[in-house]
Image (cartoon, rainbow, N blue to C red):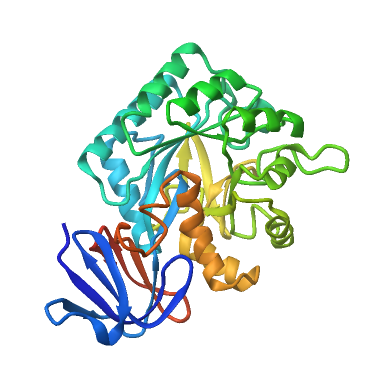
Amino acid sequence: MSERFALSGARIFDGEAWHEDAALIVANGEIEAILPAGAVPAEVKQVEAGGAMLVPGFIDLQVNGGGGVMLNDHPDLASIETICAAHAPFGTTALLPTLITDTPEITASAVEAGRQAAEKRVPGFLGLHLEGPHLSLARKGAHDPDLIRTMTDADLEALVAAADEMPVLLTTVAPESVSAEQVETLVRAGVIVSLGHSDTAYANVAAYAQAGASMVTHLFNAMSPLGSREPGLAGAAIDTGTLFAGLIADGIHVDPATMGIALRAKRGPAKIFLVTDAMAPIGTPMTSFTLNGRTIFRKEGSLRLADGTLAGADLDMISAVRFMHRTIGLELGEALRMASLYPAEAVGQSNRLGRLARGARANIVALSGDLEIGSVWIDGVRAFRA
């Protein structure tokens, strides 16, 4: 557990508002207070922030790999530790290691690894995201079609049991492979259900949202598009106030103009939030890697199969924040909320994550004026220093 200290001389964004020339008091891994810089108690150790911006740590709900590791290839505790550590230098202080469609055996191993990570309290580990295997073949993307299948009673029981093993369990499913009744059962058990990799129609999405689905996976990608006579899953995600939606903000997966349209049109209270969909190369110089025996090539800012199909993203969270601020033109606070507060809300964790407020976990990112990362703290312990 961390000591009691104050980060002083900073501009602080608490998740809602900015505090100028302020100090952030941290104690026992939590935020104690935000005070004027000159009001720090004498007994509190002060750490000079040097005028940096202190912002809530980023939360990434879709992280397939990092540090040279894919969770699919090595579904174990060591891989989860590697992935979490690889993303910390980019400002991510809480993430969901994500398993892409795989066999029941690999899925079970990933769940066990997640249980161990939760028990060990691995820094940065928030839970698991199981993206598949219960998807639509028509919208498979880079998922192996031979491993996609409908949800069985055994699959349902395994997910319900897994929900008790970790803080957050998120699963991406398609209505083509999972019934609304199964979604209801999952949601009652505490599983967060996201719709994705689906060719489903708007009316069907409404039924699944009524059943408890509360999220849509990587908006606009691998889903039925917004059309003139059929709004599809993309249109339903924007028009349905209870559906949060992840967005891969690299300028490759979604055109910037489309991002802007979606942000202006999104019906609340649910919001669009940032995800990286990152793969093994993050934090490494790797130029290729494998997924389910297929080679994925890293080139010109994207990751693709040999046939050109996008396979995850070569993206980190601070780069996504910069893109939303500089290219899309969002006010910086809103870009930061998309990386912190909104994903925390999407998984029911905003009382402890996504804010710098009393009682919240001391997950903090120090940013320079040009949005370079200086330091990162996870639960009050410095996890990265530039």
In-front residue for pair 214/284:
214
Image: 71 above or below 350: above
Q: Nearer the viewer, residue 118 or 270?
A: 270
Q: Is residue 104 above or below residue 216?
A: above
Q: Residue 56's quadrant in the figure?
A: bottom left
Task: Give the side of residue 331 with respect to residue 31, left or right.
Answer: right
User: Looking at the image, which residue sits at the far left?
Assistant: 43
Residue at 59% in and 37% down: 142
Residue at 44 percent across and 13 percent down: it is: 154
Q: Is residue 147 visible?
A: no
Q: How many marks?
A: 0
Residue located at (38% from left, 29% from top): 163
Name the image quarter holding the N terminus. Answer: bottom left
Where's residue 114, x and y in %? 32, 35
Quadrant that contains the C terminus: bottom left
* Residue 59 falls left or right of residue 193: left
Viewer-side residue, 234 vs 77: 234
**In this picture, residue 264 sits left or right of residue 297:** right
Q: Return the residue found at the far top.
A: 153
**Residue 251 placement: quadrant:** bottom right
Q: Is residue 293 above or below residue 215?
A: above
Q: Position of residue 298 (x, y in %)?
A: 52, 53
Q: Is residue 44 above or below residue 384?
A: below
Left or right of 161 on screen, residue 276 = right
User: Residue placed at 22% from the left, 81% from the top?
Assistant: 40
